[in-house]
Amino acid sequence: MKGILYVISGPSGVGKTSIIEGTLKRVRNLVFSVSYTTRKKRPNEIEGKDYFFVDESTFKSMIERDEFLEWAVVHGNYYGTPKKFVEENLQKGFNVLLDIDVQGAMTVMKKVKDAVYIFIAPPSFDELKQRLIKRGTENEIDLQRRLEDAKKELSYIPKFQYIIVNVNLNESIDQLCSIIVAEQLKVERFIERLGEYRIFEEGGKADARCGA
Ligand SMILES: Nc1ncnc2c1ncn2[C@@H]1O[C@H](COP(=O)(O)OP(=O)(O)OP(=O)(O)O)[C@@H](O)[C@H]1O
Ligand SMILES: Nc1nc2c(ncn2[C@@H]2O[C@H](COP(=O)(O)O)[C@@H](O)[C@H]2O)c(=O)[nH]1
């Protein structure tokens, strides 16, 4: 059985991490792919949970060894998705969630045709700015850079299949859970798993459970 790849993108500070954390608590059979980055670790971040923090030469060696499903320079740092983790988990039948920028999403779109692409948008540019200021993780220069990048990132919305406007966090979590479950219930995906659906066998019963 093959799992589904869910790709979440959106500007910095829109609430992707918050929505993903809430969703992971509610949806079973769903795993989050922890990225590699050269960005400096924030005080509250945990190695291996938030990111694998590496230096630039380590990251570049990983690029040369083709260890990334995708990688990009985002807001001045390298970020990449570990190919082995994603492939192994999909193969085992787990659904995998990526939190990556729009450049990375475009790369994955070329490689993984049946992935699900979801854009998280802010209610307004001012609200995005306030969330970043309130989070307090960036200095003034980095904050301005992220806000500038946000304008370009929003122009990618038409390339995505779903959009969640993150006004209320709980509602956004509900919406992401709904998308995840709806995708699992698509007949075209179910047909791929028909071998596991044993209702027609003597004494057999349906095993077409979805993740939520
Ligand atoms: N719906 C919401 N309303 C108000 N604040 C929110 C909402 N969703 C998230 N936040 C807050 O906004 C800030 C940014 O959220 P978060 O860190 O999840 O964003 P992000 O998209 O993952 O950012 P980045 O791309 O930089 O990792 C956090 O302080 C979070 O608590
Ligand atoms: N292309 C990729 N982008 C990634 C990856 N992991 C995270 N990101 C994106 O980076 C920005 C900034 O994140 P922050 O933690 O420094 O605030 C954010 O938009 C993420 O979506 C990745 O593996 N590839």
Image (cartoon, rainbow, N blue to C red):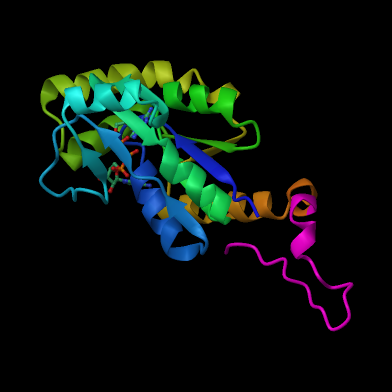
Q: Is residue 40 magenta?
A: no
Give the percent coordinates (x, y) of residue 192. Answer: 76, 50
Q: Residue at x 82, y 78 (%)?
A: 204
Query: Which image quadrant is residue 84 in?
Result: top left
Give the percent coordinates (x, y) of residue 190. Answer: 76, 54
The residue segment tinted magenta is 191-212
From this view, report whether residue 204 is shown above or below residue 16. Answer: below
Query: Which image quadrant is residue 143 in?
Result: top left
Nearer-the-camera pick, 168 or 206 = 206
Residue 166 visible here: no
Give the percent coordinates (x, y) of residue 88. Answer: 49, 48
Query: Which image quadrant is residue 197 in?
Result: bottom right
Q: Is residue 207 magenta?
A: yes
Q: Residue at x 63, y 56 (%)?
A: 181
Q: Is residue 43 left or right of residue 24?
A: left
Q: Tell which residue pokes out farthest to the front in this image.
A: 65
